[in-house]
Amino acid sequence: MRGVARRGLVTGAVAGAVGAVAVAGDAAARPRRARALPGPAAGRDVVRRELRGMWVATVANTDWPSKPGLSAAAQRAELTAHLDEAVERKLNAVILQVRPSADALWPSSYEPWAECLTGTQGKDPGWDPLGTAVREAHDRGLELHAWFNPYRVAHHADPARLTASHPARRNPGWALPYGGKLYYNPGLPEVRAFVQDAMLDAVRRYDVDAVHWDDYFYPYPVAGQTFADGAAYEKYGAGFPDKAAWRRDNTDKLVRETAERVKELKPGVRFGISPFGVWRNAVTDPEGSPTRARVQTYDDLYADTRGWIKKGWLDYVVPQLYWHIGDTAADYAVLVPWWSDTVRGTGVDLFIGEALYKCGDSARPAAWQDPVELSRHMDLAARHDQVRGHVYFSAKSVAADRIGAMDRVVADHYRTYARPPR
């Protein structure tokens, strides 16, 4: 019955959106802050303060739009259906990917329109998705966190396939191919300045509640391939003991400078990052977690996530703890207390990233076939006082809920609405 109701909601939204599509005027709109109480009814019982969020991924049309080239009315209807789904699930925040691959879901002064909208990078979709998303989310009492990817340029390695006006084509020395993809080179100061300007354009123009990054800094390692930043290292790497230390400093600079610029621009806008869930294994560093993960963000992505917390550069952190309770390499039950201890006393809010997309996936371990697994995560996290909420990947899985895992979370833990943390 819930699926039928949702389909009716989408159909009705499409009908209501025809003739009322936001066009260029959205860019100048002044979206309103989220209401004090989540959901459209102000009289609902709200007894908790915790973040309850979901990611809405736009890269490769993962969650939204469902496919490129939909009409503006259909895109808007799908977007508002995701927001309505969040309200129905008693969530209070949506993390919308607005800069998926060095392109934009708003009329950016720096980068082309995103390919996921029309199927053609740089083509105007006829409306302002980010402006509309902020307004529609706030009208529903939801926070809207603008999710940016700093360095990914394309899911292919051919700059000639980018739109002619793309900054990576106008500045051919900025981008490097690696693993079949294109990335901006984090070692170039002009690149770091540009990507900050491109992201902060959205913060300046819209009433977003937070700037949000995911786990991609330097690219994940690809066996047998080298990220060819040697020339930048020769030019800028003096004084560092090795290239790894220089790379980590480059990422540190991006995080610190962005944090400072966000606060200068709009002090009320938060800055949060959702890193891969393992900083370092304890066998590598005694400060690390008792895990045996193949990837360590400090060593492989050159991202000192623990250091950023300790230095107070973040307002919140959402480690992607995408493992089940009892996982032999990275146990959810081990990582939650490690992250809780890491943020303690720092003033950085800890929210846990949850792998809803794994629930009911037959290729996953048996724990993910149990609809109670995520509810057990909530029970465990509740025993650690620094955990202040959860975020679910991703919107498509929240709606589909293959085995009822999200239903179980809502029934067991979200019986009332909650305000986000202050």
Image (cartoon, helix red, strand yellow):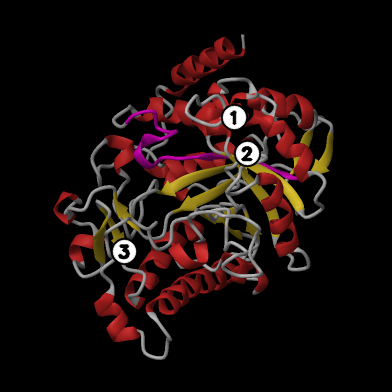
Q: Which circle marks residue 184 in the picture? A: 3
Q: Amino acid at mark 2?
A: His
In the image, residue 62 lies in the stretch drawn in magenta: yes
**Label 3 CA crowd tier, 10 Å (few <14, some 14–19, many 20+):** many
Regarding residue 37, the answer to whether it shows in the image is no
Q: Nearer the viewer, mark 2 or mark 3?
A: 2
Q: Which residues are magenta?
A: 50-67
Give residue 109's position: percent from left, percent from top.
Answer: 34, 59
Q: Amino acid at mark 3?
A: Tyr
The residue under label 1 is 368
Cβ–Cβ under 8 Å for marks 2 and 1 = yes
Q: Return the residue nearer the eye: 33 or 398.
A: 398
In this rendering, position of residue 165 left or right of residue 137: left
Q: Return the residue nearer the eye: 29 or 74.
A: 74
Classify mark 3: helix, strand or loop. strand
Q: Earlier in the sequence, mark 2 or mark 3?
A: 3
Q: Amino acid at mark 1?
A: Trp
Q: Residue at x 31, y 47 (%)?
A: 113
Q: Return the residue nearer the eye: 250 or 371.
A: 371
In this rendering, position of residue 104 left or right of residue 180: right
The residue under label 2 is 324
In the image, residue 265 lies in the stretch drawn in magenta: no
Regarding residue 185, the answer to whether it shows in the image is yes
Classify mark 1: helix, strand or loop. helix
Q: In which quadrant of the rendered view does residue 267 lie? A: bottom right
Q: Residue at x 37, y 59 (%)?
A: 219
Q: Return the residue nearer the eye: 34 or 157.
A: 157
Q: Earlier in the sequence, mark 2 or mark 1?
A: 2
Q: Earlier in the sequence, mark 1 or mark 3?
A: 3
